[in-house]
Image: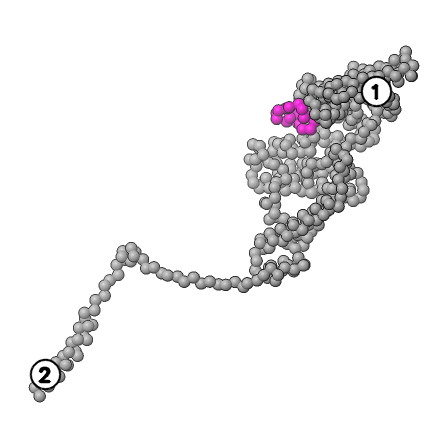
Amino acid sequence: MISLVLNAALLAVLLVVIPSKRQTSAYVRPINPALVASNPVRIIKTNVLIRPRVFTWQEIESGDYTTYVENLRALGMPEATIRDIIIADIEQLFVKKRRDLASQQDTEWWRAQPSQAYQSNQLAQAFALDEERTTLLNRLLGEDWKKSRLDQQPDPVPLTGPILSALPDDVKKTVQTIASRSTDRVREYILQAQNAGQQLNQIELAKLREQTRENLSKVLNPQQLEEFLVRNSYNATQLRRQLEGLDVTPEEFRAVFRRVDQIERDIQLRYSGDDADSQRQRSALEQQRLAAIREAVGPERYDTYVMLNDPVYQESLATTEKAGASAEAAAAIYEITRATSDEVARIRNDVTLTAGQKQEQIREAQAEQQRARALVLGEQLPEPTTPPVPIEPPLRSHVKNPGETLGELAFRYRIRIPELREANPGIDVNRAPAGTVLNIPFATQPSIQPPLPPGAR
């Protein structure tokens, strides 16, 4: 019994002591922030993959572009992506249209340069295709698509140099917009004239160029405007062609442009007509223009300028280029032509010769001219021929202005110097006093208008 009681007491003590010991012996170690910072807990994230709905292009493509665009938008595709897809598709469509149109039309392969009518027709058809393309894109994407495309297209005009390149970006963008709209206006006018079967009106084109200048003057100061015009305007382009061969410096070109630009604008806007008053005013302004060029480049280089713009010299230059000869050969042929013209004029004014003798001597002078030309070009001498005596061309009158020269008159009326000499036998045009009435033959070959530059600014 004593043993049983002791065991029971021991069991009771054990039941009380052991749980309390477990509770009091538990030790919670405090968190050490430095230890946590040096041993960060790695959190493992799981990748959640959201599988998009699978579609095929067959589900969204449609023969109707409007439905096609709606299907793309129904997929939640960004508008920029939709725009790029539609524009690329339409560009490809119109590339094919242009190729088909070109394959249906023959070129003027027999001409050195296409005629003005052919060039105008080509430009009108290209403009019509571009209008069709723009209308389609406006209907599908709205007119805002143009704004997003402007930044991707090349600039209509280069804004280079120390003045134009320093323009603020917003001003540059405005100038490019003005140049682009100028081009659009010219193309639209040409298309309208083509559709109406009318010739291009040079005064209307000059008015379009003046509108461009006015728009530019609202965003550019006078110095910036002059810099733009001397580099990109229509008059500057024409002046570069006329001064080709003089090797002028940039400063000389600016000087000439400043002197002649306003004169050219007055001629183009006011005196481009065929009436007597317009011709008289144009003649006076062209005299001022030639005097301004002479003052800018000097007398010697001015004589070179007159020769380079003489139709006879241009014809001589074209002859030598075709034959592969040098520029010196062109000058030689030019002198041969002038000498022959002088000789023909002398024969016609020789009162001691009969009509038959004049014809015979004129044929001999022309044959000598052919032999001399062949010798300069290294060609085989042509067989003797009996060319017919040329028919006298119709004449018109011109009252000589002070200082007016033979070359200036030939350049103004687009005729050859020999023709002008022949029409005025016995008169030294260069030394004739002001007021002398001169005979001016009409041009035997109409001048071909060159294609308009982009914008015709």
Residue type at tag 2: Leu
Give SS at disc 1.
Answer: loop
- Local packing at callout 1 (Cα closer than 10 Å; few below 14, some 14-19, many 20+) is few
Which image quarter is the N terminus in? bottom left
- Name the quarter where the C terminus is drawn: top right
Q: Which mark is residue 6?
A: 2
The amino acid pointed to by label 1 is Pro
| Residue located at (78% from left, 16% from top) | 339
Specify the quadrant of the image occupied by residue 155.
top right
Element type at mark 2 = helix
Numbered circles on residues, count: 2
* Residue located 16% across and 78% down the image: 16
Q: Earlier in the sequence, mark 2 or mark 1?
A: 2
How far apart are the alpha carbons under marks 2 and 1? 163 Å
| Neighbour tally class for label 2: few under 14, some 14-19, many 20 plus, Cα within 10 Å | few
Examine the rendering and report whether any part of residue 335 can be seen.
yes
Q: Which residues are magenta?
A: 240-259
Could you tell me residue 424's position as x and y percent?
84, 18
Q: Is residue 294 visible?
A: no
Residue at the spot of label 1: 384
Q: Which mark is residue 155?
A: none
Q: Is residue 387 left or right of residue 4?
A: right
- In the rendered image, the residue lying farthest to the top is 352
Kindly check if marks 2 and 1 are in contact, taking CB atoms under 8 A apart as contact: no
